Image (spheres, grey):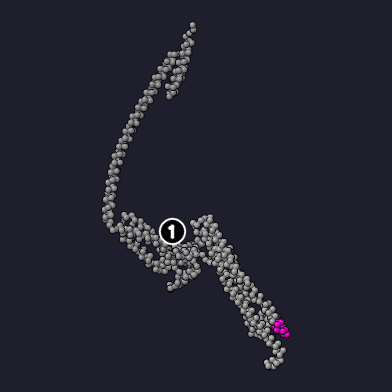
Amino acid sequence: MMTIYPNVIKSVIKNTIKKALTVSALSISLASLSSASYAQDAVNLDDLLNQLAQGKITQTKQNQARESEFKGKLNQQQNMLNDMGLQRDNALVLSVQLEQNFADNEINLANKAEALDKRLGELKELFGVLQQVSGDTRSKFQTSVISAQIPGRGQFLDEFAQSMGSSSKLASISEIERLWFELQREMTQSGKVTTFNREIVLANGDRKNAEVTRVGGFNLISNGKYLEYIDETGSVAELMRQPSSRYLASTSDLIESGGNTTAFALDPTGGSILSLLVQAPDLKERVDQGGPVGYIILAIGFVGLLIALERLISLVLIGSKVERQLKSPIASSDNPLGRVMQVKDNNPNLDTETLELKLSESILREVPKLSKRLTLIKIISVVAPLIGLLGTVTGMINTFQAITLFGTGDPKLMAGGISQALVTTVLGLVVAIPMVFIFAYLNGRSRNIVNILQQESTGLIAERAERAELENSPELAGQGA
C-alpha cells in the first residue's frame, strides 16, 4: 500500500495546472502582452484562480471592444456601399441620357449633312475641280524655274487645296481669282527671257548674289553656267557638273546677245534632258573606263603617232631634195638620188654591168633609210586591236565575277566590266585604223622615192651602155655624128 503525501500531490497538481494555464494563457492572451500582471507566478491555487478570473474578464472586455469597433466599421462600410450604389445608379441614368443624346445628334447631323448637300448642289463639283487644279498647279510650281524669281506661290495653293478638300468652307471670289492669276502668270512668264538678281549657291558651296537669266520656264543660267532650282530649300544652285562645252557656249551667246535672237540649248522637259546630259561621261571618263589596258593602247598609239610624224617629216624633206636633184645635173650628197648619181660620177670607166651592180648596191643602201620604222607602225596597227580584245575579255571576266557574287539584280555592279570590255575595243580600233592609213601613206611615199632612184639608175645604166656602144663601133659613132 502506497502512502500519499498531500503536499507532494498539491505540488504536482500545482505545477501541472501552472504549465497548462501558462500555455493556455499565452495562446489566448497573445494579443494583449502589454499587461504584465499575468506574468507573475501564482503562489497557490487561489492566486492562480484569481489570475485566471481577472484574465478572462480582461479578455472579454477586449473582445467586446473589438466587436464594437467591427460593428462600427461595418456600418461605415454599409454607408459607403450605399453611396457607391447611388453613384452607379446616377451614372446609369446619365449613360442612358448620353446615348439618347448621341443618337439624336447623329440623326440631326445626318439631316443637316443631307440638307447641306442639297444646298451645295453643283458647288461640290466646283470644290473638287478647284482642289484638283490647285494641287496640280502646286506640283507644277515645285519644279518650275519661275519660282526662283517669284517665290512663295506654293503656300497659298497648299492652303487653298486643303480648304477645298474639307468641303466645309466656300471659296471666295478673291481666292478663285488668285488661282486664275497664278495660272495666267505662269503661262505669261514661261514665254519671257528675264534677268534678275538673287543669291545662288556655287558648286564649291559658297553663296553670292549674281545676275540670273531665266529662259522661260525651261532653264536658269548665270555666268555662262546652268543653274537648278531646289524647291525644298527655295534656293538656286549651280549644277555640280555642267554639260559639254557646246551647250555652255550657247549660254554665253544668250547673255551677250543683248535681246537679239540667238541659238540656245534649252531643256523643254524642265531638267530631265539636262540631267541626262550631265550624267553622260566625257572623253576623259570614257578613257578611264578602259582601265590599265586602255591606257596601254593609248600609249602605244601615241608612240606610233610620234614615229609616223617623224617619218612623214623625214620623207617630205627627202622627197623635196630628190625633186631638186632631178632638176640639177650636179650630184649632191644630201639626198639619196644625188648619192646614187655620185656612184656613176665616181666610176667613169666601169663597164655597164659593173656600174649596174654598183648602182643597185647604192639603191639597196638607201632603201632601209627610207623605210625604217615603217614596219613598227604596221606592227602597232596590228597589235592595238589585239590588246583591245584582251581588254574585252578581261572586262567580261570581271562582269561574270560580279554576276557570280551579286547576281543580276543591280546592273550597276556589272557596268564597270562591260564598260572596260567595250571601251578597250573602241580604243584598239581607234588606234589601229589611223595607223593602217598612216602606214599605207608613208610606205607609198617611200616607194615613190625608191622608184625614182630605180628609174634614174636605169637611165644612168642606159646612158653608159649607149656611150660604150658608140665607142666600140666607129661606124655607129660616125652615123651618130
Q: Residue at x 42, y 15 (%)?
A: 49
Q: Which residue appears farthest toward the top when viewing the image?
A: 1
Examine the structure image and report whether residue 396 is included in the region drawn in magenta.
no
Above or below, comparing residue 336 to residue 183 in the picture = below
Callout count: 1
Q: Choose top left, top right, bottom left or bottom right for residue 178.
A: bottom left
Nearest the viewer among 430 and 383 is: 383
Q: Is residue 405 visible?
A: yes
Please tell me whether mark 1 sits on a helix, a strand or a loop: loop
Above or below, comparing residue 118 to residue 33 in the picture = below
Crowd rating for badge 1 (residues with CA inside 10 Å; few <14, some 14–19, many 20+): few
Above or below, comparing residue 308 to residue 7 in the picture = below
Examine the structure image and report whether residue 347 is included in the region drawn in magenta.
yes
Q: Looking at the figure, which quarter contains the C terminus?
A: bottom right
Q: Residue at x 28, y 54 (%)?
A: 117
Q: Amino acid at mark 1?
A: Glu
Q: x and y percent of residue 38 in the render?
A: 44, 19
Q: x and y percent of residue 66 in the render?
A: 38, 25
Q: x and y percent of residue 17 in the render?
A: 45, 15
Q: Residue at x 26, y 50 (%)?
A: 111
Q: Choose top left, top right, bottom left or bottom right for residue 102.
A: top left
Give left or right: position of 238 versus 472. left
Q: Residue at x 65, y 74 (%)?
A: 372
Q: Which residues are magenta?
A: 344-354
- Residue behind mark 1: 232
Above or below, comparing residue 436 to residue 321 in the picture = above
Q: Choose top left, top right, bottom left or bottom right for residue 230.
A: bottom left
